[in-house]
Image (cartoon, helix red, strand yellow):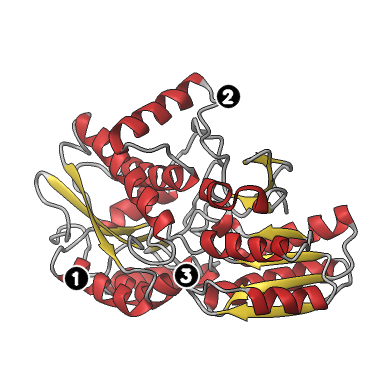
Amino acid sequence: MLHSRILLAAAFALLPLAAGAETPGVSHDEITVGSIQDLSGPIAMLGAPVRDGMLMRFEEANASGGVHGRRLRLVVEDAGYDPKRAVLAARKLIQRDRVFAFLSNMGTPVVMASMPMIVEAGRPHLFPFSPHEATYLPLHPLKFQIYAPYQDYMAAATDYMVKTHEYSRTCLLYQDDDYGLEVMKGVEAGLARQGRRLTERTSYKRGATDFSSQIARLRAAGCDLVVLATVVRETVAAMTEARKLGWEVDMLVTASGYSAQTHALGGPAVEGLYGVSVLPHPYAEGATPELAAWVARYRERFGAAPNVWSVMGYTAADLLVQAAQAAGPELTVEGFRVALENLQIRPDIFGGPVYRFSADDHLGNRSGRLAQIRNGRWQLISDYLH
């Protein structure tokens, strides 16, 4: 622990944003925040609601006077889920827009390509949509994460599913990049708890639309559980292909496929799909009065119903607002970091986890829950898994 503190002290010595110096993105009346999303590529259906959720929370804060009188401004760049475009977007946000921090950048390939440049420039890298351990380890003053890492939650989910349903032939369909490889490590670890190994694995290239060969291979292997390291569109395509062949195998998708768009697009083909839940979906039906009012405000503002990605964007933006408020009127990166590490976060209206950070731990949550699509909507079926 002492070694970690020494490393942190050394890191801060290199930051150009110490108290008393000009803080990029912070002026007398404004705080500028950047975000790299997919608004035109294969996961645009996730990036758009994340953007809208963040924007909604910032607009609420601005309507209440901002943060110590400063208005929050969100600048979003579209990387189309392309790592090369993400690097260009990060450079623009750092150099031209001079953002104070990066919030909820979307996608593991995008994050892994752009994060080194962001932290080297001295900008906080906050809550990216990439549950990769590199987003919080090794401990770094600028890296904070709230999403449980793929390896941890997929190990727990796989272990739970195999133990509960007594599967004997677990297989994996995975995206051929950092995302898929991290999920694979988690699935293998979960199977090892049961003294088992993967029966078969097969990959696909990012953005693929045809899964006929992969599904045929997994079916030929006699899989009784298929774990999907996919996102929404690919989840629907894989399950549709399996059902078209009459293969009713159980499937479990990561949190990247846990979305209302999955059952909206997949219909009967995705009925029964298991998924790892980050937090409950904000369905208007059966919602508490507070949540129902939030859903109505979102629908009025954006002309569409919110989904879990809307909530995650909103929640991430809320954490930034809380930390910036707690940091005081003289906002610096170091002051923001200290405030976030000591933030007392309370349960919210969405039913998600209570995030906690400390000087020695920048991962705010380590667990997920299991859900299943039943009668056309996600239902939670477990408590937090460990």
Residue at (87%, 73%) from the top-left corner? 196
Please say if 316 is above or below 301. below
Residue at (51%, 70%) from the top-left corner? 137
Q: Which residue is mark 1?
A: 92
Q: Residue furthest left?
A: 28
Q: Which residue is mark 2?
A: 286
Amino acid at circle 3: Thr
For the residues marked 3 and 1, what is the alpha-carbon distance in whole angstroms? Answer: 20 Å
Residue at (45%, 47%) from the top-left corner? 312
- Quadrant position of residue 327: top left
How many marks the image carries: the answer is 3
In primary-sequence order, the first of circles 3 and 2 is: 3
Q: Indicate the position of residue 373 as horizontal and vertical percent values.
A: 67, 45
Q: Which residue is mark 3?
A: 108
Mark 1 secondary-structure assignment: helix
The residue carrying pointer 1 sits among few (fewer than 14), some (14 to 19) or many (20 or more) residues within 10 Å by Cα, namely: some
Mark 1 vs mark 2: give the one in front: 2
In primary-sequence order, the first of circles 1 and 2 is: 1
Q: Residue furthest top?
A: 289
The residue carrying pointer 2 sits among few (fewer than 14), some (14 to 19) or many (20 or more) residues within 10 Å by Cα, namely: few
Residue 149 in view in this figure:
no
